[in-house]
Image (cartoon, grey):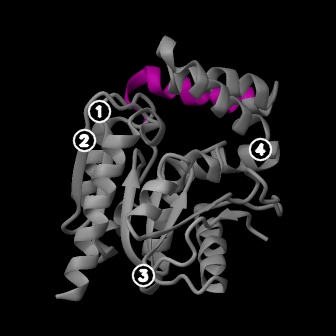
Amino acid sequence: MMHYLDPAPQNPHPVLLLHGLGSSAASWQAQLPALAQAGFRPIAVDLPGFGRTPYHGQWSPWHAAQEALALLESLRALPAHVVGISMGGTVALAAGLDFPEQVRSLTLVNTFAALRPDGLRGWVYFAFRMFLVHTVGLEAQAKRVVWHIFPKPEQEALRQELFAEITQADPRAYRAAMRALARFNVTARLQEIRCPTLVITGAEDTTIPPKTQAMLAQGIPQARQVVIPGAGHAVIADSPDAFNQALLAFLREVNHAALD
């Protein structure tokens, strides 16, 4: 059974929140209250092998999307707005492509249609992460990642939170997810997406190049992109107010259009 957080089950308008690699539903702690207070029903899940959801021996964005939507069906929370960051964005894309009738809108955050690092430095970073997770394990991987995601001195608390999340993930799931993300490529299918779509980009994202995210937005019919100044890859944590403002404005617009 997929573990999830559902702090406002009484609210209409479900919003499925999909976390990034190594993280969990807890990474949305700055969004859950804001969404609930705005009248939405945020549902944050632990994807397979992360947080408190067990790993069952296979991992792909498609499989994760199917499990997450099955959970929402059991909660009578479909169709839903789907929001995914980084790895969670690939799961959101899989949901929008293969289960369009269950997706009201897509919000794709610091994510990609195909993982293409920006230059040699980017390739070395991902290759070194792959080496670490397949040799010395998650703790060494976590130490590398948290400083890359949160490089500023004042972000120590955020580094500690992310380190704790990564090190509780199932190593098998983490490795399988990294391999699946390296293979993920839906560039040729982006034109199939018909639901309202917003791409949110941290201007200082050093993990997924902003130009890669711009290409994602350009590939989806009528998608829009919002760039948040000063935000990094973990925009939901390092710039929560600006992120929440952009997300809520989009969700309200989609709901309002549905009433017209």
Instruction: Give the answer, above or below, for where 134 lies relative to 60.
Output: above
Instruction: Give the answer, above or below, for where 18 lies relative to 103.
Output: above
**CA distance separating discs 1 and 2:** 6 Å
User: In the structure shown, which secondary structural element does the residue marked by tag 1 occupy?
Assistant: loop
Which amino acid type corresponds to the residue marked 2 in the rendered image?
Val
What's the residue at 49%, 46% (across, down)? Answer: 30
Magenta span of residues: 117-132
Q: Which residue does the numbered mark 2 point to in the structure image?
A: 227
Q: Which residue does the numbered mark 1 point to in the structure image?
A: 203
Q: Quadrant of the N terminus?
A: bottom right
Residue 106 seen in the figure: yes
What's the residue at 76%, 62% (across, down)? Answer: 58
What's the residue at 37%, 64% (across, down)? Answer: 38
Which amino acid type corresponds to the residue marked 1 in the rendered image?
Ala
In front: 136, or 22? Answer: 22
Residue 216 seen in the figure: no
Instruction: Give the answer, above or below, for where 76 lies relative to 93.
Output: below
Residue count near mark 1 (Cα–Cα under 10 Å), binned few <14, some 14–19, many ≥20: some
First in residue order: circle 3 vs circle 4: 3
Which amino acid type corresponds to the residue marked 4 in the rendered image?
Ala
Residue 8 point in image, percent of width and height = 55, 69
Residue 236 point in image, percent of width and height = 45, 43
Residue count near mark 3 (Cα–Cα under 10 Å), binned few <14, some 14–19, many ≥20: some
Which amino acid type corresponds to the residue marked 3 in the rendered image?
Pro
Q: Are marks 3 and 4 in contact (CB under 8 Å)?
A: no
First in residue order: circle 1 vs circle 4: 4
User: In the structure shown, which secondary structural element does the residue marked by tag 2 occupy?
Assistant: strand
Quadrant of residue 93 in the image?
A: bottom left
**CA distance separating discs 3 and 4:** 30 Å
